[in-house]
Amino acid sequence: MNGKISKSLSIDNAKELLNSVDAFIFDCDDLDDVNMQGKKLVFVTNNSTKSRKQYAKKFHSLGIPVNEDEIFLSSFAAAMYLKVNDFTREKKVYVIGEEGILEELEQAGFTALGGPADGKKKIELKSNCLFEHDKSVELELLSLDLTNISTFISYSMSLLRLPFLIYLNCSLYGTLCIRENPGCLFIATNRDAVGHLTDLQEWPGAGCMVAAICGTTQKEPITVGKPSTFLMDFLSQK
């Protein structure tokens, strides 16, 4: 930046880099050995399954003294997007995601529905069945939901034999909100196709569920996590 030519980091120029920069932004993966004393560290991740409070506990267990305000998650970015854009706190948000995003929304003062609990509910789809959903939901917020991914596959396979009893797949409910609630917004924490849920394999990420909703609603979401403009601007301001 500023007209300088970038170059690969090496042992020879590492000290030069450390002396020229005041703040560093890290991803939250592989944090077993982070030691940059005297520098401001900021941690950013698209993982929305945890809250900043939960991540802070993880950092402390690794011996890294990080405060919550130095951690930027895509779940936190979603809550801040609503706050920055004056989304009324009385409005309802339907969440496809884990507990982390529910916690961040609650801390920001928003009313959140859905989450992991909806993945455990059951509905029966049969002829002349009209599923009633909350018509007052004005925003759907989609992030990684491991239960939702597995039940979506089960739902797709079960379409071959109606009627059937299935778990309430959150993507079905979210589709109804976007298609049938006038003006309902569609926000995604990120569109990562895969996630590093284990050390040895890559697994489906939030992007596969975003794609499913895009396909059923013919709408594209506002993305607030990496590499969105919103997140980078928010980081710069902070």
Image (cartoon, rainbow, N blue to C red):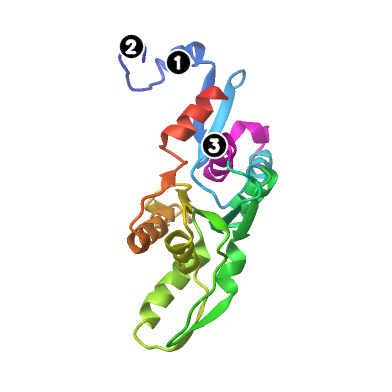
Lateral position of residue 106 relative to residue 217, left or right = right
Task: Say what amino acid the circle numbered 2 marks.
Answer: Lys
Q: CA distance from mark 3 to mark 1?
A: 36 Å
Q: Which residues are magenta?
A: 61-86
| Res. 5 in view | yes
Question: Does 3 sit above or below residue 187?
Answer: above
Residue at horizontal 62 percent and vertical 44 percent from the top: 88
Residue 112: horizontal and vertical position, in percent? 62, 55
| Res. 97 in view | no
Residue beneath disc 1: 17
Residue beneath disc 2: 4
Front-most of residues 128 and 40: 128
| Residue 68 among magenta residues | yes
Residue at horizontal 50 percent and vertical 11 percent from the top: 19
Front-most of residues 140 and 228: 140
Lateral position of residue 81 relative to residue 155, left or right = right
